Amino acid sequence: MDIVDHIEKMILDGSCGFFDKFDVEDLHVTIRIARDFNSFLEKFGENPPTDEIVYVSDTVRSGMDQFFSLAQVCGFIETEDEKWSFDQHLSWNYGALRLEFLDTFERLHESLDVNVVQRLTWLLTLTHLELVFLAKHFPSAMLSGISEGSRRPSEPA
C-alpha cells in the first residue's frame, strides 16, 4: 500500500463513516499533494531549483478547492475532548518550514495510536505550510520560470 492510501485508510478507519464519496476525493487529493510536497522537500533540500519550485507550486495550487472543501468538512466534526488547534507559521524561514513539514508528515504517516482529529489537524497543518510556501514564491518563481524557459506563457499551469 502506498503512503497516500495508507494515510487515507488510517483517517477513514478512525472517522466512523463521516466522509462521503466527495469528501473522500478531497481527502485523497489533499494527502497526495502533501506527499508530493514532502517528496520535493526531501529531494531538493535547502536549495530547490526554480523550475522545481514552479512545479510544486502548481501542484499545490491544483488542490486549492479540495483543501478548502476538506477544511469545511472538518469543521463539522464534533469533538468533546479534542480542540482544533493550529500553529501559525508567521515568518518566512524556508529551513524551518521544511523541517516542520517533514516532521509533521512523518508523524501523520507513522503514528499509530492517534485519533482522527489529530490526523486531520496534522494534514491541515501540512496544507497550511504548503500555502505559506506558495504565497512566498508567488508570483516571482512563476515569472522567473517563464523567463528561464521552463514553461511558455501559453502553456497551462
Image: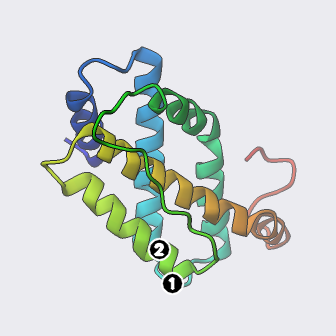
Check the image and report above or below for 10 versus 59: above
Question: Which quarter of the picture shows residue 142?
Answer: bottom right
Q: Secondary structure at mark 1?
A: loop
Q: Earlier in the sequence, mark 1 or mark 2?
A: 1
Q: Nearer the viewer, residue 91 or 139?
A: 91
Mark 1 crowdedness (10 Å alpha carbons): few <14, some 14-19, many ≥20: few
Residue placed at 49% from the left, 79% from the top?
96
Residue marked by disc 1: 46
Residue placed at 85% from the left, 71% from the top?
147
Looking at this view, name the residue that lies furthest to the left: 113
- Residue 3 in sight in this render: yes
Residue placed at 39% from the left, 28% from the top?
77
Three-letter residue code for mark 1: Glu
Q: Nearer the viewer, residue 148 or 82?
A: 82
Q: CA distance from mark 1 to mark 2?
A: 8 Å
Circle nearer the viewer, 1 or 2 = 2
Question: Percent position (x, y) of residue 25?
Answer: 45, 26
Q: Nearer the viewer, residue 44 or 83?
A: 83
Q: Are marks 1 and 2 in contact (CB under 8 Å)?
A: yes
Image side of residue 112 versus residue 26, left or right: left
For the image, the number of numbered tags is 2
Residue placed at 86% from the left, 54% from the top?
153
Tag on residue 98?
2
Question: Percent position (x, y) of residue 120?
Answer: 37, 42
Q: Quadrant of the N terminus?
A: top left
